[in-house]
């Protein structure tokens, strides 16, 4: 049975339950009887225990290649979590149903207003399938390893969102934007004593990235731990600015100057440019400002090999190498190439289809392989020539964001 949360209140019973679980685990550790932190399902009700816990507070956990390969749409049980704040009582995959949850829309608009989740649910709804990814995904592959949670490949998933487009909301309310508005700044709720969390997007996401207030995920109300009852979603972007538990949207002339916008979640750029990452010396420090860096907005092009899995043994001489590729959705991905000889030669894979311009591109590459040890590599290229570097470390940055180096998988054929 779907459990409803009390309107605008903390589910004290669930909060105490999970606090007790975490407290018990910490107590055992203190007595030397346990060496590991709680499992994913102990920290978040409804999560698959196979998820890898990277942090207990705030909750951070990643999926696995095996789980990602097991389903086309990533279920709420298998979807990663990267929370920057803790809202007590919401560490569950059950929906957080709060019809009277209120969102304020303010800033450079002619008529500021507030709207509830119930009112939003009566407006025209849009559904979009997107790849959701933490911008730190792949951080452990940088050398030397940057600071932050040690993500491998599992900070990602493909999700179907349902909600109200921001442009639809403004039209429905008869609200006009001031010509000076260039950014959208979102604030998360601070209920239960949560720390403030504020992020900005360029206003162009309204037009090009299907920016919406999402109320649903994968055909059901938004799970509590994934931002329910309402969150911001902009397709084709990294996860950090897709603010969960959204309470305010402000249209502004400039991006936020809060700590979550700068210096966090930024990569170096050449002065006067907004797209390229400025190569930095591995192991060096960088003084991040609004002028010499950019926020992690649009997702970069990338691809994963989902079969064979690393370290696996495959029978038969015809080996199907399978995987997914994705980018920011602004242009199509045109090719995925696969190499089984260290990059000496590459063969184009067959693109079997995609789940919309913001979703996975599914591909397969049949290989005739004699028995032996192999290392397979895959790289994607899109319509404007963006591709993956053979050596992802060329874009080393001290916070370990936006890794998209060519993936390499070692396996055996018998």
Image (cartoon, rainbow, N blue to C red):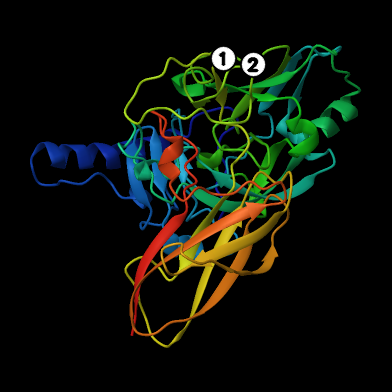
Q: Name the residue under label 1.
A: 290
- In the rendered view of the protein, which quadrant contains the N terminus? bottom right
Q: How crowded is mark 2: few (under 14 residues within 10 Å), some or many (20 or more)?
A: many
The one of 127 and 259 positioned closer to us in this rendering: 259
The one of 350 and 343 positioned closer to us in this rendering: 343
In the rendered structure, the answer to whether residue 332 lies left or right of residue 274 reads right
Foreground mark, 1 or 2, reads: 1
Which labelled disc corresponds to residue 255? 2
Query: 219 above or below 184?
Result: below
Marks 1,2: beta carbons within 8 A: yes
Query: 204 above or below 374?
Result: above
Report, in whole angstroms, how far the alpha carbon at label 1 lies from the one at label 2.
Answer: 9 Å
The one of 372 and 91 positioned closer to us in this rendering: 372
Helix, strand or loop under label 2: loop
Q: Where is residue 226 in the image (x, y as percent from the top left)?
A: 54, 41
Which of pointers 1 and 2 lies earlier in the amino acid sequence? 2
């Amino acid at each position: 049975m779907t459990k409803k949360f009390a309107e605008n209140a903390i589910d004290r019973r669930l909060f105490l339950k999970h606090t007790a679980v975490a407290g018990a685990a910490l107590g055992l550790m203190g007595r030397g009887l346990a060496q590991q932190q709680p499992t994913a399902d102990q920290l978040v009700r409804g999560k698959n225990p196979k998820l890898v816990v990277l942090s207990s507070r705030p909750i951070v956990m990643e999926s696995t290649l095996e789980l990602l390969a097991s389903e086309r749409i990533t279920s709420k049980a298998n979807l990663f979590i990267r929370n920057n704040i803790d809202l007590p009582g919401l560490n569950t995959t059950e929906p957080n149903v709060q019809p009277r949850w209120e969102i304020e829309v303010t800033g450079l608009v002619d008529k500021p207003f507030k709207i509830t989740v119930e009112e939003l649910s009566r407006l025209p709804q849009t559904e979009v399938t997107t790849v959701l990814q933490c911008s730190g995904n792949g951080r452990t592959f940088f050398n030397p390893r940057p600071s932050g949670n040690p993500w491998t490949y599992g900070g990602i998933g493909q999700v179907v969102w349902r909600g109200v487009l921001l442009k639809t909301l403004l039209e429905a309310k008869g609200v006009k934007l001031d010509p000076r508005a260039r950014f959208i700044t979102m604030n998360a709720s601070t209920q239960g004593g949560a720390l403030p969390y504020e992020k900005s997007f360029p206003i162009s996401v309204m037009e090009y990235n299907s920016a919406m207030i999402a109320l649903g995920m994968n055909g059901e109300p938004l799970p509590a731990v994934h931002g329910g009852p309402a969150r911001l979603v902009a397709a084709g972007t990294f996860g950090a600015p897709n603010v969960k538990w959204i309470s305010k949207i402000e249209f502004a002339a400039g991006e936020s100057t809060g700590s979550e916008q700068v210096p966090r979640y930024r990569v170096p750029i050449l002065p006067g440019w907004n797209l390229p990452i400025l190569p930095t010396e591995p192991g060096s420090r960088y003084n991040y400002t609004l002028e010499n860096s950019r926020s992690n907005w649009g997702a970069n092009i990338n691809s994963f090999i989902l079969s064979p899995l690393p370290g696996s043994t495959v029978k038969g001489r015809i080996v199907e190498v399978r995987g997914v590729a994705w980018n920011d959705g602004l242009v199509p991905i045109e090719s995925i190439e696969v190499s089984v000889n260290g990059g000496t030669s590459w063969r184009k894979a067959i693109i079997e289809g995609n789940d919309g311009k913001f979703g996975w591109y599914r591909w397969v590459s049949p290989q005739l392989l004699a028995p032996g040890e192999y290392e397979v590599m895959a790289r994607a290229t899109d319509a404007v020539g963006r591709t993956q570097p053979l050596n992802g470390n060329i874009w080393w940055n001290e916070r370990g964001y936006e890794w998209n180096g060519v993936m390499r998988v070692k396996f055996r054929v018998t």
